[in-house]
Amino acid sequence: MPGLFISFEGIDGAGKSTHIGALAAAFKTQGRAVTLTREPGGTPLAETLRTLVLNDPMDALTEALLMFAARRDHLVGVIMPALARGDVVLCDRFTDATFAYQGGGRGFDETVLTQLERMVQGRADSVNGRLIQPELTVWFDLAPEEAAKRLAGARVPDKFESQPVEFFRRVADGYARRLMGDAGRFARIDGGQTQQAVWHDVHAVFVAKGWLA
Ligand code: TYD
């Protein structure tokens, strides 16, 4: 079976983690090998970069470069080999997060992000310049005010989680712009529902694709 690359996105507190775990279990039940991974991170080098980028202050270009450096290492070291083996790759965040957080949230130049995306996700064997992108991106869309309520007191916030609600409004707008630019790749899930209703919607997307029974 060919590999399947799926990413999961949303602002902090949108509640994607439990559903990614449930999907991994559902695919395994059907006999598929699953690679469960995350960004920034997923390799020893990229996890080191994650610790730096989520904790140390730095300028917006440095932050964007480190996100894409981590992504390159992750793609080459984990994602591409897993897809070549035929695994289902479930990736907690990918490049849409860079456009949403660094582009939308921080206001960093999206034309530069587009150049970095081409550099990092270009394929040597591509004839039409197509980039390596997830086949499906599940976007958990939740109002920033609601996400802030859920996060309050839940844990010690990192550099992004401690941002004000206006930051997350810009991040959400960034996700919406990415969806508009590539609507066929996205499934938007209403993250404001109960966890059970969210799971129902997520599962239905995978059934409709023919990937889960
Ligand atoms: P997150 O995925 O929410 O993990 P956890 O559930 O462990 O907190 O944390 C990753 C953070 O990194 C999140 O705040 C979004 C941010 N981020 C970016 O700013 N740019 C990126 O390109 C990626 C992948 C993540």
Image: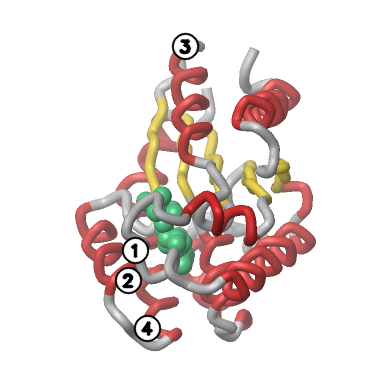
Which numbered marker is on residue 62?
4
Would you call the spot at circle 3 few (<14 residues within 10 Å), some (14-19), or many (20 or more)?
Answer: few
Sequence-first tag of 4 and 2: 2
Q: Which residue is mark 3?
A: 29
Which numbered marker is on residue 53?
2
Looking at the picture, which amino acid does disc 2 mark? Val
Q: Position of residue 153 (x, y in %)?
A: 40, 54
The quarter of the displayed image where residue 48 is located: bottom left
Pointers 2 and 3 in contact (C-beta within 8 Å): no
Give the foreground label among 4 and 1: 4
Disc 2 C-beta below 8 A from ligand 1? yes
Would you call the spot at circle 4 few (<14 residues within 10 Å), some (14-19), or many (20 or more)?
Answer: few
Q: Which residue is mark 1?
A: 70
Sequence-first tag of 4 and 1: 4
Q: Nearer the viewer, residue 158 or 29?
A: 158
Looking at the picture, which amino acid does disc 3 mark? Thr
Q: Position of residue 154 (x, y in %)?
A: 40, 50
